[in-house]
Amino acid sequence: MRGDDLILVARDHERLTQLADRLRQAHGIDVEVMVADLAEAADRAAVAERLQDPDRGVELLVNNAGFGPSNRVLDAPAGETRRAIDVMIVAVAELSVAAAAAMVPRGHGRILNVASLSAWITQGSYSAVKAWVKVFSEGLAGELRGTGVTVTALCPGWIRTEFHERAGVTTSSIPNWIWVDARTCATEALADTAGGKVLSVPTLRWKLAALGLGILPRPTVRWISSTLTQSRD
C-alpha cells in the first residue's frame, strides 16, 4: 500500500462514495469524490480545473475512463462512436494537458494513460481509439522530456475486471492462461510509471504479444484482427 490520497472520478455517485468509504477505512487515506461524465464538455472542464488547483496539487493523473464499443463499427448505435471519442480521446487529451500544465512549473508529476494491446491490431473503433491514446502519450512524453513530468501509456491485454461483462463481450472461450489479474496489471503499471517508462505492457506474455504484433506484416495483423472480430460474433 502506497498510502496516497486519492481523487475518484466517475458517473455513479453511489458506487463512488461506497468505494471512497471503504478506502478511507481500510487505509486511513483522504479520498475526494468527483461525479463527472467525461463525455460532457462541462464535466471535463470541472475535472481539468481541479487538476490545476495550485493549492491542491495532483502528483499522478490516471486516465482510465472508458467502455467497450460495438464489435463492428457499422453495428454501433447512433452516437456511440462520438461518445467513445469524447471519453477515450478528448478527455485523455484535455486532462493530460491540464495536468501537465500544472505539473511542469513544479518540476515533477506523472501521467498514466490507459491504452490497450488493441492498439496494435485493427478491431473496430476500440483499436483506433486506443492506438490514438498510445501515440498521443508517446508524443506528449517526448514534449515533456527534461521537465520532471513523465507520461506512460499502459497497454494491457485481457485483464480480469467487469469491463468485458459490461461491454457484452463473451469471454468463455478465452483460455485461462491469457488472463492477467487487475492487481498485477496495476502494480506493474505503477512501477513503470514511477520509473518513467513511456510504454507499459504488463507481464511477459503480453510483452511478447506486442513484440509479435509489431513485427508481423500488416496484412497478417489485419487477418488476425478480422478473425478476432468474427470469433466475438
Image: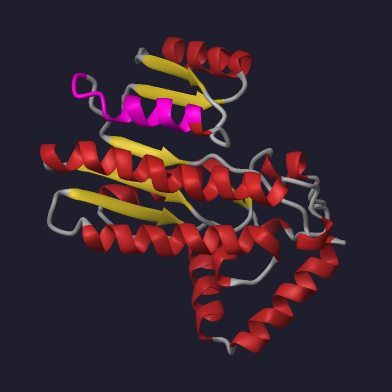
Which residue occupies 37% across, 57% down? 137
Q: Is residue 168 above or below residue 220?
A: above
Would residue 118 be found to the left or right of residue 226 on screen? left
Residue 225 is situated, as x and y percent measured from the top left of the image, at 71, 73
Residue 1, visible in the rendered structure: no
Name the residue at the right extreme: 233
Image quadrant holding the C terminus, namely bottom right
Which residue occupies 53% across, 25% down? 36
Residue 68 is situated, as x and y percent measured from the top left of the image, at 69, 48
**Magenta span: helix, strand or loop, mainly?**
helix
Which residue is at the front of the view, 149 or 30? Answer: 149
Which residue is at the front of the view, 190 or 141? Answer: 141
Residue 191 is situated, as x and y percent measured from the top left of the image, at 33, 48
Q: Is residue 1 above or below residue 198?
A: above
Q: Quadrant of residue 216?
A: bottom right
Range drawn in magenta: 42-55
